[in-house]
Image: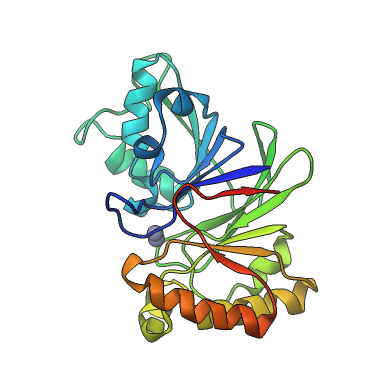
Amino acid sequence: MDIKILGAHNIESINTRHVCFLIDDVLAVEAGALTSSLTFPAQQKLKAILLSHQHYDHIRDIPAIGMNFLLHENSIDVYVTRPVYDALSAYLLHDNIYVNFMERPPGKPAIKLKILEPGKPESIHGYSVLPVPVNHSAPTVGFQITSADHKTVFYTSDTGPGLADVWRQVSPDLLLTELTTSNKYDEFARTAGHLTPELLQQELDSFREIKGYLPQVVLVHMNPFEEKAIEAEIALVARTLNTKIQLGYEGMRIHL
Ligand SMILES: [Zn+2]
Ligand SMILES: [Zn+2]
């Protein structure tokens, strides 16, 4: 399994992108950086997009990719839970905003929305995908994705602490976890449903207690203004837990 991170941050600039990654160049997770980071041929290679929740930073490129697929007379499957389906059809994939790509062009729409049930594994273009509810300010699922050769990544999406129930349902080789800000924003993180290095340390402790091992850990959804502080604080967490934790970045490739 080849993972390529297109976006590793929670705000956008010329050198930071919203969260988004590819698996083997065919499965996209989140739409935070799909059009700005990929050539047209790379976009046309995509078979499906998974969306974890309806927040703008995760769904933003859906209309843009819809237009690109429409002009290529192609269509793409977008997998979402019911609340995300409702939000997309009410707002973003709506003729008031731009084009309703769920109905255009008629008969062969550019975007085919497919509903995922939390807790129910789905086979998507050769991958087994398990959506697992996490703790965020909007209804959100993380995704465990397993390839045909049994390599497994779990992406937490945006989440706050309290993930013991999640750990019981997944067994990843790689944990791609959100880590939004530094320890001084503990209260914000708990209220908004995000993680800091100290909060992640508690979650990794609980992972190891429940599963008996720690996976490779890569961080995404970082606030660029806090990245220096995150780097220093996470180095301490890695030393304490005696494990390797890497900060994700745009263009990072991980081979499992
Ligand atoms: Zn969010
Ligand atoms: Zn987010």
Identify which residue is drawn at 60% across, 82% down: 202
- The answer to which of 256 and 152 lies nearer the viewer is 256
Identify which residue is drawn at 45% across, 28% down: 43
Q: Residue furthest left?
A: 96
Identify which residue is drawn at 32% across, 34% down: 63
User: Residue 66: horizontal and vertical position, in percent?
Assistant: 36, 28
User: Residue 45: horizontal and vertical position, in percent?
Assistant: 52, 25
**Does the rendering let one see residue 105?**
no
Q: How many numbered tags mark residues here?
A: 0
**Which quarter of the rendering shows the N terminus?**
top right
Left or right: 72 with respect to 154?
left
For residue 137, above or below residue 18 = below
Q: Quadrant of residue 102?
A: top left
- The answer to which of 177 and 111 lies nearer the viewer is 177
For residue 133, above or below residue 31 = below
Left or right: 223 with respect to 130?
left
Left or right: 40 with respect to 52?
left
For residue 100, above or below residue 104 = below
User: Residue 116: horizontal and vertical position, in percent?
Assistant: 56, 44
Q: How is the image coloured?
A: rainbow
**Ligand 2 position by quadrant:** bottom left
**Does the rendering let one see residue 59?**
yes
User: Residue 209: horizontal and vertical position, in percent?
Assistant: 75, 79
- The answer to which of 128 and 177 lies nearer the viewer is 177
